[in-house]
Image (cartoon, rainbow, N blue to C red):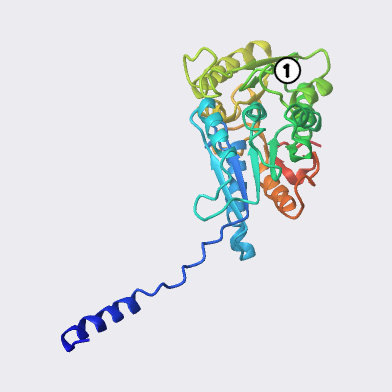
C-alpha cells in the first residue's frame, strides 16, 4: 500500500468505528391495566351523578402516584351523541393496544355509566377478549344476569348501584309532617309530579324512588311521572326537540309552582340529570321553597336554590369497586354490588 492511500484507509477505519451499532433502548413498558369510562352525551357538568363519577375517575387517575407504580391507565369518553358513543366504544373494544407505549393491555374494564348503554354491547361483545370486563352503573343483579346471558359474557359483567330509598323514605315522612301540621290545614299529597329525564319504557330506573313513594304514600297518592326527553333527544333536548331539557325544566318548575297553589300539593320529585339546572334556575328567583318543596335526585346543595336533595356518591363507590377489582383475578368480582347505607350518599332531609 502506497503512502498516499494510507490517510484514506485510516479515515475509513475511524468512520466504521464511529458507526458501531449501540444496543437499542428497551421499549417503554406501559401499564398492564386500562379502565375506560363512558358518559352519556351532555351529562358532564350536571353537578350531580355524572360529575360524581368523574370525581371517581380523577381519584383513580392518581392511583399510580399513591402506589408508586405504573399499573393503571384510566380514560373516559364524553361523546357528542349516541352514534358517536357507539362508534368510539366499538373502536376501543377492537384495539387493546396501549396508546403511548408498546404492547397491549393485559386486562381492561369498560365502565358504562347509564343503563341504556348496555345496548352498545351488541356490537362489541365478540371483540372483547377473555380478560376484558364490563361494569354497568345504576342497575341491579337481575339486569346484569340478563345482560351477561344475552351477550355471552359469563362472569365478566358486573353491576354497581346506590339505593336512594332511605332518603325518599325520609321525604315521605316530611310530607306527612307537613300535611298534619295545624298551620297547613289544606295541604295534601293526593297528586305528586315526578319529573324524569327519560321515560320508563326506555330507561330502567333502579334507584328505588318510585317504589318507595308508592309504598310510603299509598294508593291515595297519584304519582304523576313525566319524562322531559327521550332517546331521540339524547337527554339533552326535549322530546319534541323544541328546546333544551334545561329550558323545559325551567318551564315545568314554573308550571308546577303555579298549580301547587291550586291543588294544595306542594311536593315534587325532580330527576333530570344535567336538566336539574333548569329547576334550580327557577328556584333562584323564589323566596325560600317557593310554592313547592321539591326533592332533587342526584344533586348537591345549591346556594340560593332552596330544595331537598339526595346525592349518591357514585364516584367514591366506583373508586372502591375498582380497588377491589384490581386485587382479584378476572371474573372474580360479585355480579352485583348495591350500597344502601348512609356512607354512600348524603341528603339534607331531617325528620324525627
Between 76 and 93, the one lying in front of the other is 93
Where is residue 346 shown, x and y percent of the image? 70, 42
Residue visible at 58% across and 49% down? Answer: 74
Placement of the N terminus among the 4 image quadrants: bottom left
| Residue in front for this viewpoint, 249 or 67 | 67
Please provide percent x and percent y for residue 318: 68, 45
Q: Give coordinates of residue 35: x percent, y percent.
A: 62, 46
Can the viewer see residue 240?
yes
SS for dot 1: loop
Give the quadrant of the C terminus: top right
Q: Is residue 246 left or right of residue 331?
A: left
- Density class for disc 1 (Cα within 10 Å; few <14, some 14-19, many ≥20) is many
Residue sitting nearer the eye, 352 or 43? 43
243 vs 98: above or below: above
Q: Eyeballing the image, is 247 above or below 101?
A: above
Tag 1 residue: 187
* Camera sees residue 339: no
Q: Is residue 102 left or right of residue 106?
A: left
Q: Residue 213: x, y in percent?
A: 78, 23
Amino acid at each position: 500500500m502506497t503512502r498516499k492511500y494510507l490517510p484514506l484507509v485510516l479515515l475509513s477505519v475511524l468512520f466504521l468505528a464511529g458507526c458501531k451499532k449501540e444496543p437499542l433502548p428497551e421499549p417503554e413498558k406501559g401499564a398492564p391495566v386500562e379502565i375506560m369510562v363512558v358518559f352519556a352525551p351532555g351529562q358532564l357538568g350536571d353537578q350531580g351523578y355524572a360529575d360524581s363519577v368523574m370525581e371517581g375517575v380523577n381519584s383513580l387517575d392518581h392511583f399510580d402516584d399513591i402506589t408508586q407504580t405504573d399499573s393503571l391507565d384510566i380514560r373516559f369518553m364524553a361523546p357528542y351523541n349516541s352514534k358517536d358513543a357507539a362508534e368510539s366504544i366499538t373502536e376501543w373494544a377492537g384495539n387493546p393496544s396501549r396508546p403511548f407505549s408498546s404492547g397491549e393491555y393485559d386486562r381492561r374494564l369498560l365502565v358504562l355509566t347509564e343503563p341504556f348503554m348496555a345496548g352498545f354491547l351488541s356490537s362489541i361483545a365478540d371483540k372483547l377478549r377473555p380478560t376484558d370486563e364490563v361494569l354497568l352503573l345504576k342497575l341491579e343483579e337481575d339486569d346484569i344476569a340478563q345482560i351477561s346471558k344475552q351477550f355471552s359474557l359469563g362472569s365478566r359483567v358486573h353491576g354497581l348501584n346506590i339505593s336512594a330509598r332511605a332518603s325518599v323514605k325520609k321525604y315521605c315522612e316530611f310530607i306527612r309532617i307537613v300535611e298534619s301540621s295545624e298551620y297547613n290545614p289544606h295541604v295534601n299529597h293526593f297528586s305528586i309530579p315526578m319529573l324524569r329525564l327519560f321515560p320508563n319504557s326506555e330507561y330502567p330506573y333502579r334507584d328505588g324512588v318510585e317504589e318507595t313513594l308508592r309504598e310510603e304514600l299509598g294508593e291515595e297518592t297519584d304519582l304523576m311521572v313525566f319524562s322531559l326527553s327521550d332517546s331521540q333527544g339524547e337527554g339533552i333536548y326535549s322530546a319534541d326537540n323544541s328546546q333544551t331539557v334545561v329550558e323545559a325544566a325551567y318551564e315545568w318548575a314554573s308550571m308546577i309552582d303555579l298549580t301547587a297553589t291550586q291543588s294544595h300539593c306542594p311536593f315534587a320529585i325532580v330527576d333530570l340529570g344535567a336538566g336539574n339546572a333548569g329547576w334550580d334556575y327557577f328556584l333562584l328567583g323564589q323566596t325560600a321553597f317557593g310554592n313547592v318543596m321539591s326533592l332533587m335526585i342526584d344533586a348537591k346543595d345549591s346556594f340560593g336554590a332552596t330544595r331537598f336533595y339526595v346525592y349518591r356518591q357514585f364516584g367514591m363507590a366506583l373508586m372502591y369497586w375498582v380497588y377491589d377489582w384490581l386485587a382479584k383475578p378476572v371474573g372474580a368480582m360479585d355480579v352485583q354490588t348495591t350500597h344502601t347505607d348512609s356512607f354512600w350518599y348524603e341528603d339534607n332531609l331531617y325528620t324525627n
